[in-house]
Amino acid sequence: MATLRQPAQRSHVTMISTSPSTTTLFETEQLYARDLLADEVPALQAFFDANPEYFLTVNGRAPGPDEAHTEFTDEPPAHLPYTHRWVAGIFDRSHQLVGVAGILSDLVAPGVWHIGLLILASHLHGRRVAGLLYAALEAWMQRSGATWIRLGVVAGNVKGERFWQKQGFREVRVREGVDTGGRINTIRVLVKPLALDDVPTYLAMVPRDQPGSALS
């Protein structure tokens, strides 16, 4: 599972235009998100190529030539059912692609939503944009039926670990020996309750996330 993909400062900005009429999933004053279409995979690949720092940090390599296609088409294993999957492009108000988010609803259990990916263009860093965007994403997920949000962050990805802690996530499990696409990593599984602060109920519903679990 991926984590917040927020690369380091970089001067290059990917300029991908799109129609402003597509249905918005969530938005802030500066940004809006909508589902990407299959013919926009090349635009997503260009975005990854322009922002390789996450891939370098986590996997020790730049994004591969099929990174966007994999992100767009990759499904969870059959033993991890879900209701809906979004690969959402994040656009500024001039309709330029400046980020991407991967989201699953009802992963394993009803009300458990998963963030598999969140990346923003480097020119938005240091301007409180990521926190505002996450707040809008969380509000949309909660309106849409989320009771808990989960994700996995690679141990040692300091920016990601600090960001998710700041957003109120807590660790429930550590997974060791996970191939994240180029390197074997340790994954910290994080959860945030959106209603009652009831992590025990969550763990009863999702036994794979219980501390010490051997479930993959």
Image: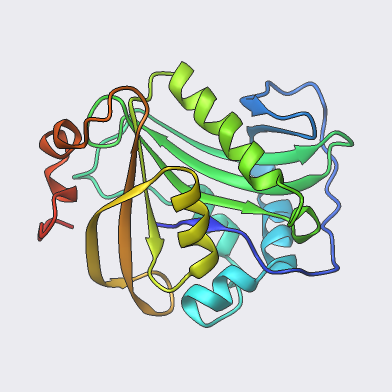
In the image: residue 119, left or right of residue 124: left
Q: Nearer the viewer, residue 106 or 157?
A: 157
Residue placed furthest toward the right = 94
The residue positioned 48% from the left and 73% from the top of the image is: 58
| Lateral position of residue 143 relative to residue 39, left or right | left
- Of all residues shown, which one is farthest toward the bottom? 60
Looking at the rendered image, the quarter that the C terminus falls into is bottom left
Q: What residue is shown at x 72% (from left), y 30% (from top)?
A: 28
Which x, y percent locates residue 181? Answer: 42, 72
Residue positioned 38% across, 47% down in the render? 75
**Residue 140 shown left or right of residue 8 in the figure:** left
Q: Position of residue 35 (x, y in %)?
A: 61, 33
How many discs appear? 0
Q: Is residue 122 visible?
A: yes
Q: Is residue 37 visible?
A: no
**In this rendering, would 22 be left or right of 67?**
right
Based on the displayed image, in which of its 4 quarters is residue 161 positioned? bottom left
* Residue at the image point whose x is 10% and y is 57% from the top: 213
Q: Nearer the viewer, residue 119 or 68?
A: 119
Asked if 44 appears above or below 182 in the picture, the reply is above
Residue 99 versus residue 49: which sits nearer the camera?
99
Across and down, in percent, residue 107 comes to 29, 36
Give the vertical position of 75 relative to 29 (above or below).
below
